[in-house]
Structures are given as C-alpha cells and as structure tokens.
Image: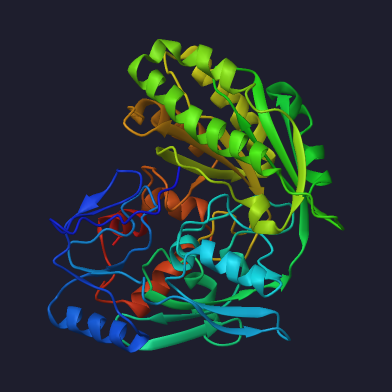
Amino acid sequence: MVSTTSTTSARNGTWRNWGGTVSVRPAREVTPASVDELADAVRRAAEDGLPVKAVGTGHSFTSIAATEGLLVRPQLLTGIRNIDREAGTVTVEAGTPLKRLNAALAREGLSLTNMGDIMEQTVSGATSTGTHGTGRESASIAAQIKGLELVTADGSVLTCSEKENPDVFAAARIGLGALGIVTAITFAVEPLFLLTAREEPMTFDRVCAEFDALHAENEHFEFYWFPHTGNTNTKRNNRSAGPERPVPPLRGWFEDEFLSNGVFQVVNWVGRAAPVTIPAIAQVSSRALSARTYTDIPYKVFTSPRRVRFVEMEYAVPREALVDTLRELKAMVEKSPLRVSFPVEVRTAPADDITLSTASGRESAYVAVHMFKGTPYQRYFTAAERIFTAHEGRPHWGKIHTRDAEYLSRVYPRFGEFVELRDRLDPERRFRNDYLRRVLGA
C-alpha cells in the first residue's frame, strides 16, 4: 500500500498525493535546507500574496496539503537534532520519515511508545493529521509530542510545550497545517522494548461479543473484518520479556509480501474488472492468513509493508458505540449491491487532551473503510459516513470525508479554541486552502 517514489512530476510541476485523489500545480516550490530559509520563503510568499502549504509524502487522501501558491518540501529538514536520555526525549527535524526515525531510535536503544501501521510519512505530516495506531492506554503519535517548533505566518519561529506557549502546544500537535509550518518535533521516547504479536482469525460475531474483554486484556488490540463474510483477522500486541522471536524470513515474505501485497494486488485487479467475483474472493482472502505469534522490537510489530494502493475513509466514534457501528455497517453492506474487496480496519485509542484530536476528551474506536484505487468508492463511503456521523463520529483529517465546520464544531467541544488561535497566529490566512476553508469555516 506504500510507495517510496516521489509524488512530484518534474516534467509538469504537478503534485499528486499517494492515493491519486488530489493533484495540484503550485505557483512555485521551495525545498529549504534550514529553518531560516523556510522563514524567508514564508515572508516572500506573504509579500507576493501567495498561500503556503507544506507537503510530506502525500499519504493524506484529502486535499489538506494542496496549494496553488507556494509548496514547501521538507525533505532537507531531516535527521535527529538531539537525544536527551535523562528527559526521555528525542528532537527530530520535521521532514524526517517515520521509517528513518524508528530505525535510528532502535540503533540508540530507544523507541516511541506507540505507532501507526505504516511508517512512510514524515513526522510532521503524520502528527499534523492525527495519525494513530491502536492502544488501550497509549495514544496517537501526536500525543507523544513534548515540544514543537514552527514557522508562523509572519515568518517568525515559535516554540511551544506544556510550559512554553501552552495554548499553541494544545492545538499545534494536530494543527492541520493551519497554524504554521512545523520544523521540529520533540517526542517522548523510552528504552527499546519487545512486543509479542498474536494474530489469529476470529468470527465477526465473536469479536463483537468479546470486544470489551479483548480491549481490556491487551495493550494493543485491532482487527480486520472482511465485508461479505463473517470473518475477521485479529491482532494483539503486548509487551514481552523476550526472547526475541521474529517472523522467520521466508514465512514473513510469503505472508506479508506475497499474500498481503502480491496476491492481494492481483485479486483486487480481478475484483475491479469483475465486481461479481468479490464476495467469493473475500471468502478466500479472509482465510488466507493462518494464526501466528512472534516477538520483535516495536516498529517491526506495529508496522507492515503495504503496497496495494487504495482510497480510505476513517471515523473515530465513541468506544462504547463501536459494536453498534460495526453491526450497522455490516448490515448496510449485506443489504446493498456494493462489492467491497478491502477489509474494514478497527482500532482504539484512549482519550487525549489535544484540541482537534479525533480522541480529544473521549475514548475512541476507529473504523476505516477502503476501496481499491480506481474503483468507484463514493456510494460505499457515503453510506458508511451516514452511519459514522449518526454516532457523532469524527473524521480522520487526512482521509476522505465530507464534513464541514458546522458539523465539526458540534463534535469537537474545543473547536472554538482552535479557530481563535488560528485567528491570532494566521489572521491573513497565509496557510489557507480549500480544505481548511471547509473544515474550519474561513
């Protein structure tokens, strides 16, 4: 599902996101090699009346990073600035890919506490849109931030933490690119640890009936439901004293590359060409992977190689509403003519204190629906979104949704705080685009 090739066409200057849902031709681009160069570029854009947006690896499906003004590419703002072992923190440049950060931390005997399931994004792109994994007590990547540095609309450099500019810190950890351009992030880290992953099939009805217990008994629990079937694949990750027992290389290649990527790509091509085959394919796909248990360092357990391209919608609903939401989604698919070849992903997060986090102030469960790239997705996503919003769902900021400021202000109690802070930091809307206009109201 992930490509590491550039999302920029050097021939025509068009920027495209990974999922193929957004393309834009900026008036100009800049790849600053320092924070000072970035600040100068923002000031020049202001003089020329251009809006400014920074892009990472393009893994958002929304147009959150799109601009026809100045496009900032952060790939030279990479690397670790500082490791403070006593404080348990690492400060990293904003353009650093999570993959590089995870590997570098492991070499230093350190790790983030929790991660999402891919690691191709830049640290700033992942945190600014609310990227998360799954966890009973450990929250999103943004919730692990201890400090931020950002260039604001007037070209000044602002630092924030719980003690320094705390109002900015509360919002900018998931800032949507609306408050400034993040240039460095300080994360909490801990000594490298081991996780034991237990993956096994389970019926949809059983997982729903036992969900509360599965969530309570495991540090990290998630599962995938295969539409048109009553089958799921579950994954439980818990800390382990060892020893380290990684997936054997041959089995890892067969299951994670050949089955989960290679074969899955082919069956999706078949399903796109002949949708009538999808229910039968789903029955086979949902039984393709057998149970397995392995123990490894965190990023090798939390993340997976995913190369089959898709489009995605994900909503966070109150955790207590998850089972009803899933049963309604399953009933909708079964009663409709829809043919869905991708599994539905389900994860959880504890409540956090970030202003526009999808888990802000409430324990949350995430339901993500996907469709293979090039397959019409609107009917499925529209029907799913109707179910999610009936449960006061909050859309992932980087994934397809149709919600606007009027709706979002109802489901985010601190929405007004964010808008007021934006008015203060960016009164001229230097970091504007159509997406922010829709979700923030101006």
Q: Is residue 185 left or right of residue 272?
A: right
For the rendered model, the colour scheme is rainbow
- Relative to the observer, which residue lies in front, 261 or 134? 261
State the residue at coordinates (50%, 35%).
261
- Residue 176 vs 422, above or below: the answer is above
In the rendering, at what x and y percent does residue 201 appear?
A: 72, 27
Q: In this view, does 71 lie to the left or right of 439?
A: left
In the rendering, at what x and y percent does residue 24 appear?
A: 20, 54
Residue 266 image-quadrant placement:
top left
State the residue at coordinates (34%, 57%).
64
Residue 257 image-quadrant placement:
top right
- Residue 432 vs 401, above or below: the answer is below
Please count the marks in the image.
Answer: 0
Quadrant position of the N terminus in the picture? top left
Quadrant position of the C terminus in the picture? bottom left
- Residue 245 vs 140, above or below: the answer is above
Q: Is residue 219 left or right of residue 82?
A: right
State the residue at coordinates (49%, 66%).
123
- Relative to the observer, which residue lies in front, 33 or 128? 33
- Relative to the observer, which residue lies in front, 411 or 1? 1
Asked whether residue 363 is in view, the answer is no
State the residue at coordinates (65%, 71%).
107
In the rendering, at what x and y percent does residue 145 appear?
A: 59, 72
- Residue 367 vs 150, above or below: the answer is above
In the rendering, at what x and y percent does residue 385 appear?
A: 45, 35
The residue lying furthest to the front in this view is 250
Asked whether residue 328 is in view, the answer is yes
Q: Is residue 27 left or right of residue 441?
A: left
